[in-house]
Image (tube, grey):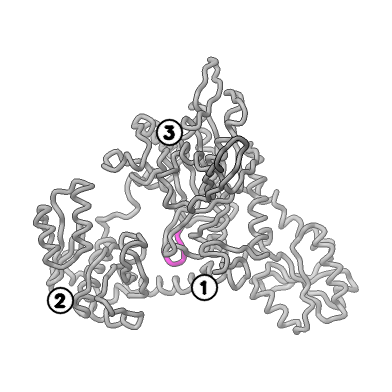
Amino acid sequence: MPVIEKNRVDKQSTIYKLRHSLAHVMAQAVQNLHPGVKLGFGPPIADGFYYDFLFPDGMTITDDDLKAIQKEMQKIVKQDQPFVQEELPFDAAIARLTEMGEPHKVEYCKELHEKKGFDTIGFYTNGPFVDMCEGPHVENVRNLKPDQFKLHSIAGAYWRGDERNVQLTRIYGYAFESKPEVKAHIQAVEQARKNDHRILGQKLSIYSIADEVGKGLPLWLPNGAAIRHELEKLAYEMEFAAGYVQVSTPHITRENLYHTSGHLPLYAKSMYPPMELHEEAEGDLEPRIERYYLKPMNCPHHHMIYKAEKRSYRDLPFRISEYGHCYRFERAGTLQGLTRVRGMCMNDAHIYVTPEQLKDEFKGVMDLHKKYYDIFDFSDYYLRLSKWDPDDPTKGDKYVDDPAGWDYTERVVQEALEEMGLDYTVEPGEAAFYGPKVDYEFRTVTGREFSATTNQLDFCVPGRFGLTYTDTDGEQKTPYCIHRAPLGTHERFIAILIEHYGGAFPTWLAPIQVCIVPVSEKHVAYAKKVEALLRGDLVRTEVDDSNNTMGKKIRNGTTRKIPMLLIVGDQEEVDSTVTVRRYGIEQQDTMSLDTYHAMLREEISLRKHVKGS
């Protein structure tokens, strides 16, 4: 596959111009209906567009208002309003925006000038509507059609995504080039919403979030814990085969560790506040104050594991892995089910390598990602290479100041991607502070994209920790470090799995793999015998010995999306058989218990899935 050295969105494409133009038309319609409303941002997005508004004090809108706004938009697109572009010097742009009464636009205009060096600012005018914008747009609103778009929802959004700022009202719309595409997309979204992990996660008793425990701190119910356990077994099998060794690290650490790593003060806003411990030591006149943090990442602890023993080039690559618990103080407004949480368990690992091993190890991690994704049959994701931005005036606050290190490591990562034939996008200014990274981007059922897993190259922090190895020449050298998490966190990855499978997990991963349905009470003893046999092989099995009718029991098992229901009655007990009913398949098969037992063992064998990858 060729490398894509550009953003995923082609700004010159017809669909981009259409969606961008409709965002302006919507803003015009809102201002027509609600004079005095102020503007935020209004970009095109993956399936349409949105615009953020600040309504006058005391004014709110609801979903019921969307019809009126849509109708006003349909009136506007029938008018003769060309999109006219102009560039204004910075001072003139500020004067115009101030006269328009747009404080958010004034703020952003100043940022473009002071931080990014813009001396001129772009504007677009269509009819009476004027907006600060770089474009592009269609030539005239008449190029838009009344049936190409559909407003669908309203949400709150903090200005610039910061909860310390004012909250704006965001209006979303779908937009495509034809009415059938709009209709098909709406139907697809409605179907996809049924698979939303926040809905299925509750229906299938996978997780819960309790106010008494805290926002963003999931409680894993038995079903969710079973899925976690299977993922950890899979990771252990895969990592063992790839030469990793497992470690375990504490949930907290002393403050100085994060000063050494560079996370403090850079990352402080995303960390829980420190705990102050007053410890008395012999000879001290006053108690010493120690500050401890809940760990937001595992890497500093892993660096200390590397440092615990002397290393030579013969020990490298040194691959250590851990499902490590981390805690990050995400803003309350960004928390969302399992995809954005404050407590998480990460499939983390760090690989310490010599320069000669660097590219091959990075490729090995990318290959491990692919093996996992093939097991889960994932395809709706893309790769994003995040680099530093040497032209960013604030780069000294965001990145390690080592241009040569950046040039070398970015070249190694890009060569690895190209040699593997992987398609990817490039995002300047999105790198980790210590090096470039490749993120795997997934899309939720609501259209929101987020990084689920990552592979990062670190050329800085091992040196800060004084990590060394004895090279072939007897000299002490600093290793490079690869940070990788191909299964991400349990929280995000299980959210993806719930939506990917619609809650109907494959048998090996399902929380309850088999439910045995006795036809009547007199068949419960045989059902319990079958259950004992299967549970002896660690099959997650249960017997529905409730007073419900057999039909109700089968419906309950189907609602719970259990992969296999075993129906046992008189004939099954006499013949030592079971009647197998698979989820989503009407046909039932009756087979001997021994045959079924052997088939099931093969089906849920983790080794089968690992080898099959």
Label 2 vs 3, first from the N-terminus: 2
Per the rendering, the mark at residue 79 is 2
Residue found 12% across the figure and 58% down from its top: 93
What amino acid is found at the position of numbered circle 2 in the picture? Gln
Number of residues whose C-alpha sits closer than 10 Å to that of mark 2, classed few (under 14), some (14–19) or many (20 or more): few
Left or right of 578, for residue 504: left
What amino acid is found at the position of numbered circle 3 in the picture? Val
Residue 589 appears in view: no
Q: Nearer the viewer, mark 2 or mark 1?
A: 1
Q: Assess whether residue 446 is covered by the magenta stretch.
A: yes
Number of residues whose C-alpha sits closer than 10 Å to that of mark 1, classed few (under 14), some (14–19) or many (20 or more): some
CB of mark 2 within 8 Å of CB of mark 1? no
Q: Which residue is mark 3?
A: 412
CB of mark 3 within 8 Å of CB of mark 1? no
Which secondary structure dominates the residues rendered in magenta?
loop
Taking depth in this image into account, of 17 and 437 the one nearest to the observer is 437
Q: Nearer the viewer, mark 2 or mark 3?
A: 3
Marks 2/1: CA–CA distance: 39 Å
Residue found 19% across the figure and 56% down from its top: 109
Q: Which residue is mark 1?
A: 194
Label 2 vs 1, first from the N-terminus: 2
Secondary element type, mark 1: loop
Extreme right residue here? Answer: 574
Q: Assess whether residue 181 is covered by the magenta stretch.
A: no
Left or right of 14, for residue 496: right
**Magenta segment range?**
443-447
Q: Quadrant of the N terminus?
A: top left
Q: Position of residue 195 (x, y in %)?
A: 53, 69
What amino acid is found at the position of numbered circle 1 in the picture? Lys
Label 3 vs 1, first from the N-terminus: 1
